[in-house]
Image (tube, rainbow, N blue to C red):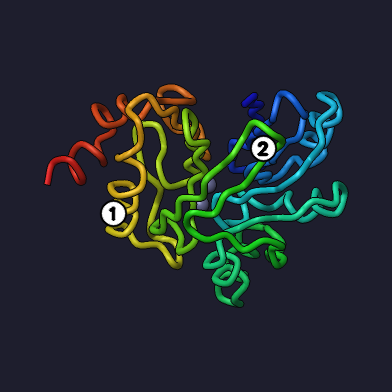
Amino acid sequence: MKLEVLTVGALAVRCYLIICPETKEVAIVDPGGDEGRILQKIKELDLSPRYILATHGHADHVAGAWWLRQKLGVPVAMHEADDHFFRQPEAAAIFAAWGFDPNEPADILLKDGDSINIGNSVKLTVLHTPGHSPGSVCFYDGEKYLFTGDTLFVGAVGRADLPGGDFEQMLRSIETKILPLPEDTIICPGHDYGDQPFSTLSREKKTNPYIVEFILGR
Ligand SMILES: [Zn+2]
Ligand SMILES: [Zn+2]
């Protein structure tokens, strides 16, 4: 796998381009804005887009998805729970208050355990990790990288005070879906909120206060 990272949108979302180096096929994870810059990067690297993947349905992570879908002709994939939840009027009203357009329907509704193939060398597994939002997911490449969206940050976890959020559920998701992965798994979060942009699971188990105190400590 080859990775490119762009920081996009007003809320500085980390948008990842997950690339199969052999075929140059790419999945775009969380295009939360600056879609023109994302498109330019894809052209510059001569990539063939296959999917737009959402770690969750918050508008700051998918604001650029609908324009890119139209430009590139590729499907948007999101967990079914967030596709449903964030198109309800109450949730759309919050996005509007943040200055975002409402979400459009996703093309592919993800479930826990689904596989997403990118070219012939990358296979992502969908881990449903609800808590930050009902349909938050992490994407795991099966060997090294975990894209955690707003569920797990370097040194922190996501907020759970937005509609559909549940702090205890988020901790359980981290405990049951993320902590069992290999210690050297590289954590690729949805925002660069920590002391470094990436981390490893072993480092987070030692230094992330939410994991240390609220999960391992109880
Ligand atoms: Zn979020
Ligand atoms: Zn976010």
Q: Within 10 angstroms of label 2, few (less than 14), some, or many (20 or more) residues?
A: many
Q: Residue at x 80, y 48 (%)?
A: 68
CA neighbours of label 1 inside 10 A, class few (<14), some (14 to 19), many (20+): some
Query: Viewed as shown, does residue 175 lie left or right of 89?
Result: left
Mark sitting earlier along the chain (2/1)? 2
Q: Are marks 2 and 1 in contact (CB under 8 Å)?
A: no
Question: Residue 156, relative to residue 98: is it above or below?
Answer: above
Mark 2 residue type: Val
- Closer-to-camera residue (196/144): 144
Q: Nearer the viewer, residue 62 or 109?
A: 109
- Residue 54 at x, y percent in the picture: 61, 51
Disc sitting over residue 172 in the figure: 1
Where is the N terminus found, in terms of image quarters? top right
Identity of the amino acid at label 1?
A: Arg
Instruction: Name the residue: 77% across, 56% down.
Output: 66
Q: Secondary structure at mark 1?
A: helix
The part of the image, by quadrant, that contains residue 26 is top right
Q: Is residue 153 left or right of residue 35?
A: left
Judged from the image, the secondary structure of the residue bearing numbered disc 2 is strand
Q: Is residue 99 left or right of residue 58?
A: right
Q: Nearer the viewer, mark 2 or mark 1?
A: 1
Residue 132 position, x and y percent, is: 42, 55
Label 2 sits on residue:
8
Position in image of residue 45 (x %, y %)? 81, 24
Reply above or below: 199 against 209.
above
